[in-house]
Amino acid sequence: MRYRLFPGTNIKVSEIGFGTWTLSTGWWGDKTDDEAVEMLRVARNQFGINFFDTADTYGNGRGERQLAEAFRGQRGEVVYSTKIGYDIYDPEAQSARRGQSELPQKFDRDYMRFALDKCLERLETDHIDVLQLHNIKMEHVRDASIWETLREMQSEGLIGVWGAAFGPAIGWLYEAVELCERENDIGTIQMIWNILEQHPGTTMIEAAREHAPSCAFNIRVTHASGMLEGKYTEDTEFPPNDHRRHRPRSWLINGVKKVRTLDFLTTRMTLGQAALKWLLAEPTVVTTLPNIYDMEQLREFAEASDKPDLTREEMERIAELADRNFGVDEEPISYKGTMERVTT
């Protein structure tokens, strides 16, 4: 396993991280807490993964509690990243089904400090290495008091690196661009970016390079919701509790066609590993968060870090394919968030 530093810090993280939403939310199949803890320990002890990303909303704190159980007594050996911003303490939220409908968000100073205290309690720690505001919108980007609260908590030693996670769906271009412009000491952004879905992530990275030199990216949806694992066919069916079941069939059919154009990447490694190496070719990417939901997948993705880097020719060929949408004619993607510059 190779490691990278968050710029300007001593926080060293594995190139392959572990996002706990596959273990704690039920949207990638159901895992018991014992199964989750075992996978987390294997990730750390056998494969060198030390970056674990969660959120207070993942199972109403379940993801954080799983981490605390897995690494009790080993706090100095792991890097915890969590997110706050959804009011999971509202009575209705306690019984809400996690998924496509968002809960109310709160980012006032008192709530942020309350939410952070609860995260610390569940994680059984006195500090969070990386704290991100969960799925922020433009109104939050433009509220300077929110970011000043994060700086306060950082100055108190409660958090190491602060930033924002964008979502829940792909998009949010100018939210990220404007955040880099307004708060140029931001330490990290979590976004969707992968070989098949390069926009708007590439432009976000360009904005950070120009305006926020210490901003490192941690990447989610690294495999385009499993498409880049190279295992889907036109006949693939997803279980009833799998969120991919709710996507239109065209997503599956067109995705399989695109993936077939990437067979040239599989001579030295699996397609799933090559997808991670493509991300890691970008210096501002500090870690990747593939969706890990079984031991076989854990091994495959963890071992990607030590695979050979993609060659210049392979990178250029991917860029050429992306320019023509991997040979697939389809309706333009419908993005969420602010995809055109709005100044008012």
Image: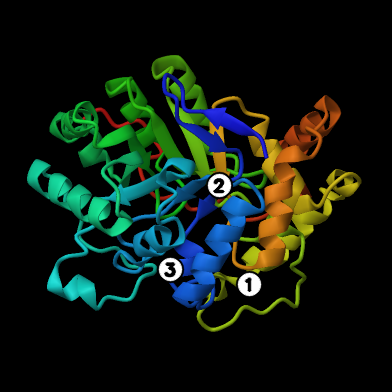
Quadrant housing the N terminus: top right
Quadrant housing the C terminus: top left
- Sort mark 2 into few (<14), some (14-19) or many (20+) by Cα contacts within 10 Å: many
**What's the amino acid at mark 2?**
Gly
Q: Do labels 2 and 3 touch, CB within 8 Å?
A: no
Q: Is residue 71 left or right of residue 303?
A: left
Disc 3 is placed on an element classified as helix
Q: Is residue 100 left or right of residue 139?
A: right
Q: Is residue 244 above or below residue 3?
A: below
Question: Which of the two discs, 1 and 3, labels the residue nearer the N terminus?
Answer: 3
**Picture coordinates of residue 333, whole percent (x, y):** 54, 52
Residue drawn at x 32%, y 67% as measured from the top left: 101
Between residues 297 and 100, which one lies in front from this camera angle? 297
Disc 1 is placed on an element classified as helix
Q: Is residue 207 above or below residue 46?
A: above
Front position among marks 1 and 3:
3
Per the image, the residue denoted by label 3 is 24
Per the image, the residue denoted by label 1 is 249
CA separation, marks 1 and 3?
27 Å
Question: Which of the two discs, 2 and 1, labels the residue nearer the N terminus?
Answer: 2
Between residues 164 and 51, which one lies in front from this camera angle? 51
Quadrant of residue 64 within the rendered picture: bottom left
**Picture coordinates of residue 251, whole percent (x, y):** 63, 64
- Sort mark 1 into few (<14), some (14-19) or many (20+) by Cα contacts within 10 Å: few
Q: Is residue 24 left or right of residue 196?
A: left
Question: Which of the two discs, 2 and 3, labels the residue nearer the N terminus?
Answer: 2
Residue drawn at x 40%, y 42% as measured from the top left: 172
Residue drawn at x 60%, y 25% as measured from the top left: 283
CA separation, marks 2 and 1?
30 Å
> Which residue sits furthest bottom?
240
Per the image, the residue denoted by label 2 is 17
